[in-house]
Image: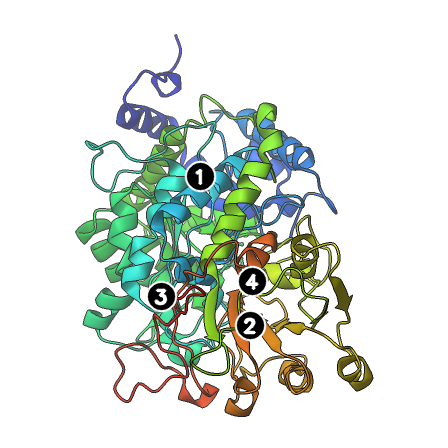
Amino acid sequence: QRPLYKDPSAPVEARVRDLLGRMTLREKAGQMAQIERCVASPRAVAELGVGSILSGGGRPPCDRASPSDWADMVDDMQRLALSSRLAVPILYGIDAVHGHNNVVGATIFPHNVGLGASRDAELVRKIGEATALEVRATGIHWAFAPCVAVCRDSRWGRCYESYSEDPEIVRSFTTIVAGLQGQTPADHPHGYPFLHSVRENVLACAKHYVGDGGTHKGINEGNTICSLDDLEKIHMKPYPDCIAQGVATIMASHSQWNGEHLHASHHLLTDVLKGKLGFQGFVVSDWEGVDHLCEPRGFDYRHCIAQSVNAGMDMIMIPFRFEKFLEDLVFLVETGEIPLSRIDNAVERILRVKFISGVFEHPFSDPTLLDVIGCKEHRLLAREAVRKSLVLLKNGKNREDTFLPLAKNAKRILVTGTHADNIGYQCGGWTIAWNGDSGKITLGTSILEAIQESVEVETEIVYDECPIEATIEAGNFSYAVVVVGEDPYSESVGDRTDLSIPFNGSDLITRVASKVPTLVILISGRPLVIEPQVLEKVDALVAAWLPGSEGTGVADCLFGDHDFVGTLPVTWFRYDDQLPINIGDANYDPLFPFGYGLKCSKA
Ligand SMILES: OC[C@@H]1[C@@H](O)[C@H](O)[C@@H](O)c2nc(-c3ccccc3)cn21
């Protein structure tokens, strides 16, 4: 007689109750543990029965792992999990935040700030669908996306992971949850986790709850100082929509609200998120989020665990010291510091998500999906997203003349700059490596390659990353394209107060634009300082954000095959000492206002 929890025809809540009733305290504690793959031993997965395994940013199973290497690794972990006493499968999680960005060859979509410029919520839903397929192709069940931060200060190293400074735009893009998980049916119970198809959809994770984008001076993992009213109007805004779409998991923020750690906030994690907003999936901590609760970090770990679990944390991204975590958690329950009812509630939520995910019935990868990774259809979708993300900020030196679209049959053009031929730079952070990298880090088309593919065969392209004066002066160029911007970064590595164009980008712009009609393309996760004397010299200026692998989308607009439609999702400040500066501020005096964006055609 098969136990009820293994019966797929039984109601989910009955399966949850049956399985919970069979579990020992240690097995319950195991389900609340999430560990990094590099410590996922048979002891951890089969004996101690951890509930989840993740690959942290830039931590592949092996160097240049192929999609099937990924799928084989995940399946190996799952086989270990199914050999545990109750054979509870694991959920494998990864940061697929702009495509399946840890996997070489996966389609890399524009980062969120660029999608924000498109204002196209349906496009974002489709990106979720495509991303889910590429993630499932590697056997992975759970994407730590979307980041629904509302970035209020561009000095924040995660600015580009935020769709916009406007909470309404961020809220409108929660359609990506429906893309990743599938669309909930009309009668879906409010707040209940949802997944349409175990083969094609992944569990989503709205993050980082709450106020991650509002920290003082944009300091990552810092303190968001604001009223409850502002917290709700600005930072909380996207969560009800995610919950209404059945988001299965929510990740707590490393940041604090008015000095209270989110990872230990009973009011925000339990009273508000689970009570008032009715969230019935599970809350997962961020990386070592529990350790961050004590200074020095990791000091009095047992007390940190009690604080966080009692506040409403359901699963802890430990991710390394799982023996200590499990020992401490069991001790805290046995001594009554954490009530067993809290553990049962956490495990109930985790099992609920596992049952609705279909992982009990389909625990292993589906090799027939492998071809979707980096497939033509997804790259065309990414190319469309790039086109719609571009914002035309200047087109011509005066009212009459327009500079774009560029001529495809120009005699001789100069393409220059650090970012003209660099896939790594145009993808930005969270791409193959945690902080991203320079060079040919994955498959794709650089902006130079896209321009080369677009112009007529008789057009001569001179590419020189940093040309000397003679090259510029004697070049006899019809026009120049200068592509400059930021080096890739993620999280605190990207926290910056100096937001001038790195690599002396302004100097190169000035040197070229003084001699040749010039288009500047900025590759960046945020607005950058463009001094007036630099801006006045250029003939045209395009903000391309972090477009990802499909540079072809940039050329599509430069040469007029498609018009520009993007508008600024963030305020373009004049100088970084204006920050923070957001639409609606008094004395709002930006270089280009929120919502600004030109079109090529006069129409
Ligand atoms: O990758 C898992 C999560 C991710 O989902 C979160 O958005 C992000 O805040 C995060 N930072 C780290 C991380 C930070 C420093 C060192 C090692 C890892 C890990 N993670």
Q: CA distance from mark 3 to mark 4?
A: 30 Å
Given the image, on which type of amino acid does mark 1 rest? Glu
The residue tagged 4 is 558
Q: Quadrant of residue 533?
A: bottom right
The dot on residue 129 is: 1
In the rendered view, would you say 234 is above or below 362? below
Q: On the rendered structure, is 383 left or right of 172?
A: right
**Secondary structure beneath disc 3?**
loop
Instruction: Give the foreground label among 1 and 2.
Output: 1
Q: What mark, if any, has residue 150 been given in the picture? A: 3
Whether residue 32 is visible: no
Q: Mark 2 = which residue?
A: 494
Q: Quadrant of the N terminus?
A: top left
Q: What whole-number distance in Å separates the C-alpha atoms at marks 3 and 1?
A: 23 Å
Sequence order check: which comes first, mark 4 or mark 2? 2
Q: CA distance from mark 3 to mark 2?
A: 17 Å
Identify residue type, mark 4: Leu
First in sequence: mark 3 or mark 2? 3
379 lies above or below 510: above
Kind of residue sitting beneath label 2: Gly
Q: Is residue 239 visible?
A: yes
User: Mark 4 falls on what kind of element?
Assistant: helix
